[in-house]
Amino acid sequence: MSYLLQLLVSGLVVGSIYALAALGFVLIYKASRVINFAHGQFIAIGAFTVYALVVYLKLNVWLAFGLALLFTALVAFLVEKLFLKPLVGQPIISVIMVTIGLASLLDGLIHLTPFGGGNFSLPRFLPEGGVSFLGVSVSYPQLLAVLLTALFLAGFGWFFQRSTLGAAMRAVADDQMAAMSLGVSVEHVFALAWAAAGITAAAAGFIVGTVSGINLESLVAIGLKVFPAVILGGLDSIPGAVIGGIVIGILENLATGYLDPLVPGGGTAEVFPFVVLLLVLWFKPHGLFGTEEIERV
Amino acid sequence: MRRLGVLILLALSFGFAQKVHLMWSGAITGPTSDAGKYYAQGVEDYCKYANEEGLTGGLTIVCETRDDQYNNANTQRNFEEALERGDPAFLGYSTGGTLQLKPLIQEVGMTYIPASYHIGNIDPPNNDYVFLPIVSYSEQVIALLEYIAKEKPGAKVALAVHPSPFGRAPVPDAKKAAKELGIEIVEVQEMAKGLDYTATLKRFANKGVEYIVYQNVAGPVATMIKDAKRLGLNIKHAAAHYAGGPDLLRLAGDAAEGVIWVTSYYMPYEDAPGAELVKKLGKRYNRPADTLESVHYPSGMLAAAIAIEAIKRAHAAGKPVTGDAGRAAVYAEMLKLGFDPGLAVGPVTYTKDDHVGVDHMRVLEAKGGKFVPITEPFQSKLFRKVHYGK
């Protein structure tokens, strides 16, 4: 029983990290209908910024984290202004191609820094070991991942429900034309959505870096791993991204725990979530919580 | 005045020295670039050093490092370009790229030195022109199993391998060797990049696993080692060449203490000529500390040194060193090559039937944040028996 419980808790922890990474992806899609293939690169920028500030400038890790959130938000904001804004109204495929190109560009730029290749590790700022209960163990970095995810969700929840800007973003997500006619600056909202996505990406990068070290390829891979999470949860649903991320995390762990011994070589965690994803999409093509759009012709 | 004359003479001789191109194609960006970046720097620096120190027999070796992004199609394009230009040898990188290129390498007769130590690179068919710089992954893993069998007879072992031909390479030989050694391979787990390996580790622990042997890259291994420590598992960790090293220490921190690692290369902090050379080149070419610490830096240096030595000897024998004839001449030299650049724990020797350069390795253990050797250089006793049946 404790084995199953451990798998579920580990899945929840990993899923929280996916959820945090997925959050930024959904924020952009929800506001602007843009699928951002460069999300992994923003995660990497956040992680490397924290590392650089802590290791080179010897800043306190939490101060570095705060600055990295701001810096990544600024980069994402500028990226939107420079590359995405001119594409408003263009076919979606053009926008997608731009984000794919953006991923390559950012990859290339990161490779021009000392962080392109190599493995890096943040100096330890959390105690060793972790928390144990009912035969289940969770490390402090993993615990931090869950807490930060919860914190960001609560923060964004408040922002969208209570703040004027959040209401404007929701209005744009619901109907751009209607929002515009009410005086909401759609361009401004798009840029803010990217900045908010930058913040969550930086947070995810920081967490991944704390849990498993900092490596460009691994960080970018996390950016791609959010795809099944957001598709499962629904591309435009913030709660969906969280639930999708957690479900994927738990499915991966259950597959490793129970299916791997049955398959020579194991590795079912890489496949099983996608099988479940396909089954879910069979019945719910817009994901568990995605908006079902009805087009009238 | 005399000094000026000598300088002019040197400049002229450099200018007129025959240029021979040598290309390396590997992952400076993309997957495994954490190794490829340093490997490329090793190739570049050794090449510059060899030219500057006159280790090229009067030739000017023009080394070119190309980023193939771990993409076989790019590797093939680079290889074909080198072939068309008349390069006499080629420095490769990945397992996939080498295995895919083997038929072409055989067809054109180009000496090919990969960074992949997959035994399939030098096994038939199409294996005449591929040369491994150091012992294969299979021999590394079997050496670890031999060490484990000595330390704990009858031990229960799990293999945690990369989900790729690179990771799977030593599995069949390791299974045969385990039988011979009387140890039990409880499970072979393919292990991709992940954020948590609790499920895998708990399963291993439930099966009584005492050792995990890794044929992987440092990132996932570090996470697994940290998770094992957090879970308080009494499991020892043993890493093949690419799974361990200073990168693992950097990523896993204290959790890496006690990890054993097998490699043929010297560590930069050791009292060895190769270690001195690493420091000297790193300083001369302004490489950062992480380059000097990386085991992939001397790995690249060794690959370049092997190719340059063969080219130099072909040239010294009065043979052409470019084009079809150059490829044949360099290959002929490879088959009788024997020299010791000092970067690894044994000399580089090749024959027609032996395409492994450095035949020895050592087991090192992480102690106080450093890998320190705990064995003398040795060869696996079982590898030849289980792999070649002799």
Image (cartoon, helix red, strand yellow):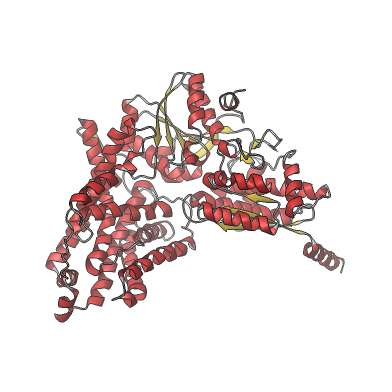
Quadrant of residue B19 within the rendered picture: bottom right
Quarter-wise, where is residue A98 in the image?
bottom left
Taking B27 as reference, is A159 left or right?
Answer: left
Q: Is B342 placed left or right of A71 in the picture?
A: right
Quarter-wise, where is residue B143 in the image?
top right
Q: Is residue A9 left or right of residue B223?
A: left
Residue B150: horizontal and vertical position, in percent? 51, 21
User: Does any portion of residue A121 appear in the rendered image?
Assistant: yes
Q: Residue at x 26, y 72 (%)?
A: A190
Residue B294 location, x and y as percent? Answer: 54, 47
Q: Residue at x 34, y 77 (%)?
A: A86
> Viewed as shown, does residue B55 lie left or right of A294?
right
Nearer to the camera, B38 or A52: B38
Q: Nearer the viewer, residue B100 or A233?
A: B100
Where is the N terminus of chain B found, in terms of image quarters?
bottom right
Q: Residue furthest right?
A: B2
Q: Mark yes or no: residue B55 visible.
A: no
